[in-house]
Amino acid sequence: MSNLPILLAEYGESHQNPTNKRVHWICVPLIMFSLLGLLWSVPVPNFMQAAGPWVNWATLVMALAVLYYLRLSVRLALGMVLIWAVMAAGLRIVEAGAPLPLWAVCLIIFVLAWVGQFWGHKIEGKKPSFLKDLQFLLIGPVWLLHFVYERLGWRY
């Protein structure tokens, strides 16, 4: 049996304030997007380049995260793959059309989103969960996704 319900409940304990929850709905996806963009920007060795334009450090990290998510919930892992595919397409768009390099755009987003996260937790009056356990950096996105699944009536 997965410990997903325990992890979601524990994560939720420090996310009760409505303002902090709204901040997380904005900032967690922005952090994911920007982190993927930063990883996307790191040059890859030739053998990775030969595999295609979608093979890079971001997709490698996504694949490893999917392995973690699969241990928790196959359905949520599939949802995360879909979200990441959309984000990867968004990164390609930013990469092609932004006036700044992708890494610079993503660094700005990353810093601003983390400022938002810490502001939300200041309002909440509780420290971010990842300060207790780093795996909560991976739980945050599925915590949001599980609400989407519940709203749609989907089991996770």
Image (tube, grey):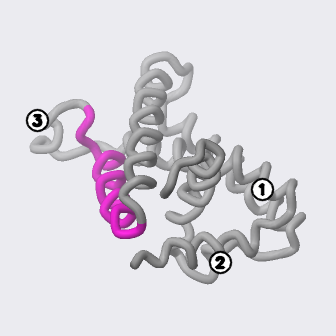
Name the residue that disc number 3 marks.
50
Place residue 69 in its image quadrant: bottom left
Residue 119 image point, x, y percent? 82, 59
The question of residue 68 being in magenta is answered with yes
Quadrant assignment for the N terminus: bottom left
Q: Nearer the viewer, residue 80 or 26?
A: 80
Instruction: Say above or below: 139 vs 115.
Output: below
Name the residue that disc number 2 marks.
10
Disc 2 crowd rating (10 Å Cα; few below 14, some 14-19, many 20+) is: some
Q: Secondary structure at mark 2?
A: helix
Q: Amino acid at mark 1?
A: Lys
What residue appears at the point 44 percent right and 48 percent down from the top-left corner? 80
Q: Secondary structure at mark 1?
A: helix
**CA separation in Å, label 3 and label 2:** 42 Å
Q: Nearer the viewer, residue 5 or 128?
A: 5
Q: Nearer the viewer, residue 115 or 22?
A: 22
**CA separation in Å, label 1 and label 2:** 14 Å
Q: Residue furthest bottom?
A: 132
Q: Which mark sits nearer the N-terminus, 3 or 2?
A: 2
In this picture, which residue range is highlighted in magenta?
54-72
Q: Amino acid at mark 3?
A: Ala
